[in-house]
Image: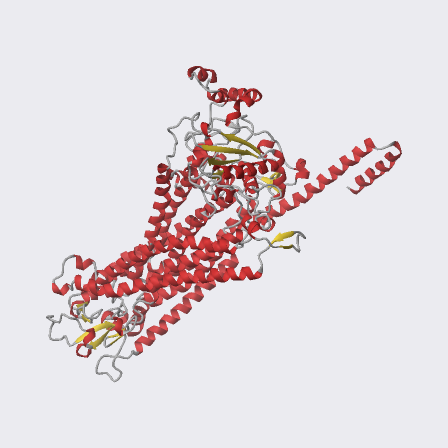
Amino acid sequence: MRRITGKAKDETLIELQSATDSQTTDENNGNGVSLLSERGTLPGNTETEKLHPNKDTVFFRDGVRRIDFVLSYVDDKDGEKKQERRREFEANLEKTGLELETEDKSDSKDQKTYFLKIHAPWEVLTTYADVLKVKVPFKESDIPHAQEVPLEWLSHPFRLPDYIMHPQPDYFTYPFDKNKTDFFLINDKDSFFPPSTRNRIVFYLLARCPYFKEGCKEKDKTGIKRLISNGTYTAAFPLHDCRYWKRARDAECESERFNLYSHWARFLCFYKEQPLNLIRKYYGEKIGIYFAWLGFYTEMLFVAAVMGVICFTYGVLSYDDNQSSKEICDANIGGSILMCPLCDKKCPFWKLNSTCLSSWQSHLFDNEGTVFFAIFMGIWVTLFLEFWKRRQARLEYEWDLVDFEEEQQQLQMRPEFEIRCTNRRLNKITQEMEPYLPITSKCARFCLSTATVIFWISLIVACIIGVIAYRLAVYAAFASIIKDPMRKIQVVGRFITPQLATSATASCINFVIIMILNFFYERVAIWITDMEIPKTHLEYENRLTMKMFMFQFVNYYSSCFYVAFFKGKFVGYPGDYSYMFGEWSNLRNEECDPGGCLIELTTQLVIVMAGKQLWGNIQEALLPLMRNWWSGRKGRHNPENHYSRWEQDNVLLNFTQLGLFYEYLEMVVQFGFITLFVASFPLAPLLALFNNILEIRVDAWKFTTQFRRPVASKARNIGAWQEILNAVAILSVVTNAFIMAFTSDMIPRMVYLYAYGKDASMMGYVNNSLSIYNISQIPERNMPEEREYSFDNLTSNCRYRDYRYPPGHDKEYTHTMQFWHILAAKMAFIITMEHVVFVVKFFVAWMIPDVPSDVKARFKRERYLIQEYLHNYEVEKLKMQLSASFITAPQSDTSLISDTHEVLSECL
């Protein structure tokens, strides 16, 4: 194998001239560009420019062999050692059959970067396509596509051209077998394996190719990942097929990147469907599955968003019918009710009508429509997951992923596992020796990993406790700054209550803590997962997924759980308040507004959810632009003949193996927000919908314009995320039931309406929901420091939110019977709602089959055709062998062969 370098161009000039001239002629015919005029107008051109005027190409200098992968490197102070590694590595690559071509640094724009171009010839592709069991076409599909449905014309504005949606015909496929090449539809060897398959095969070789000399025992010196980590190479990537803003000049180049950018990555296409088949063809099945799931999730969010808007609209329209808020705001009712201090020393007595605005705000989300929306969301989650299973099953069939996991589990063994596990044992299935991790080492690594995860989750809990302590401590400060309305407060005090100010600032602090902990834990999670040495890529991703989601679950949702299920539930009453760390801490547990804690949960949810989505979009959109600008990214300002395709891709961002992991994590955390706490904020699905419409196009833009082309990889589903979504869906039913029962004020209102109210009305509810306490019995430590208040003579009592007997009663300050009625009603509501939603969920899951019937029929048809075609193929092959034997056999053996042929024909 002869390698071509930048310094050896003269040697190749004669043998490449004819190929280059023919290629140049084709380009001139297609583009109207005269190479002769170019040569004439650019005196002093080198022989390289005469040979190859357009450097924006994906082919070797001969214009025939396609570049399947590119490695880049620079010379530095540690050059000799790295040169030796590169020499051995490249020699071993050539031994596997790969063809190499080097671009000298003098030809690069920065004058210091070398580029090693790699081409996989047909022999290598067929060998490893057989090893990897790559499915290839053997017959064009004869199953007709689905017929047009009525009113399909309504969807035409959202459709893309057919050549974009279906970039290649539909085939029946079968795993490639090198010994049966004539069985498959091989029309052109150069285009039979698409570029995504070619770069996947080459990367498989790069990840396992050693860079030590023969006889050396340093077996860990293997793979391109290790060479990049030690600086021998600076990057390794497959090439994009063209610039994203214009088609490739070479007719043999597919220009799929241009099509993706034009019809998918631009934000003006936000209302269009996604070209999933083209995404899969260009980037591979794993990225295709992600965008299919994200698109389907966004489509389903539209239904949830519409229902959420209807629920919110009902709250707005019923605004004037809110009897509780009317009573709170009434000067004769709310203005005459004196409330007990909400904190020790700093908080004064206050009038109930000071919470007038927050009670109206609370009604927007805490109304009868919210109950039906919470039940609807429990059913919506089930429909989303069940319909996604059907969509996923269809994609598995169409993208040839049905048997992928079972066939590829062994082949996906991580190179790191093979290198670091020096022990070998016999595989009982394959009867071959394979690496394994001893049980003692596995247990030790597991224990260390578990301890690390527990430590970080405990750290989150400690931070949340710190935020709660902040809320308790700062509330008194806000209460002293934001004065009581009856003391002629400033205008801002009407809109910002101490509760709202405390909740908003605590939510912002909590969000900052979340971001900081995320930054550090991501690195810790990757480190401990690497330390466990998972065997396969699938196992690695699943372990990392579980670690990260457990952390994110506690990190993002713990503050919402506190506000929803703990705040205001363990307060006590005047004279016997509960304290967070005991009375010595002076941190009295928080109370809810008379209208309930739901509005505070809404505030917490909006700040954390919207803040996370805003920060995520800033990271995804602005940071790549800044990095590429800082790295001196070239682009439209450089002519094609000066700026090669590999140089353009080299300055792009690298798409790491965990790139999709963070995309999934972001969406699953959002899924938790819109399901676990949706009863407190019906507009959450609408915010998620707007975010996801933007997310799809931002992700598409990043993949198409900002990232190097990822190595194509396969995945039949979304992996461990499916189980996480199922768990969140089940938990969401429980959390929303508890929110409606214990955080919302709906159940106490319903009990009053049907059991205690007069004439089945809500009049008098506010007075009924507040208990009485004798001010003279309040201990000194709970009394406000400023007692110069001007109240009426009827100020011997203050009110607080609870159901307790008044002073002077035989059971004073103990819970009334109404308290127990309300508690029983809350428990009954939780049990009823959970059972109703779960029964509907399981019924819907049972009614909707996971695999569509037409997909089952197609799969059976393909299996049948494979058996039939293989049988006919083997028979024809045997006939040809017998015929050949008949021709070459001696005269005495021809009668025996003829008889055998006749017997075979009779059997057929």
- Residue 883 shown left or right of residue 603 in the figure: right
Q: Quadrant of residue 212?
A: top right
Of 81 and 672, nearer the camera is 81
The quadrant of the image that shows the C terminus is top right
Image position of 244 with respect to 870: above or below: above
- Residue 664 shown left or right of residue 22 in the figure: left
**Residue 845 percent across, percent down from the top left:** 50, 58
**Any part of residue 81 in sight:** yes
Q: Quadrant of residue 109?
A: top left
Image position of 358 with respect to 141: above or below: below
- Residue 730 shown left or right of residue 414 in the figure: left
- Residue furthest out toward the bottom: 810
Question: Which colour scheme appears in the figure?
Answer: secondary structure
- Residue 146 shown left or right of residue 628 in the figure: right
**Residue 594 percent across, percent down from the top left:** 25, 67
The quadrant of the image that shows the N terminus is top right
**Residue 257 percent across, percent down from the top left:** 46, 35
Image position of 623 with respect to 892: above or below: below
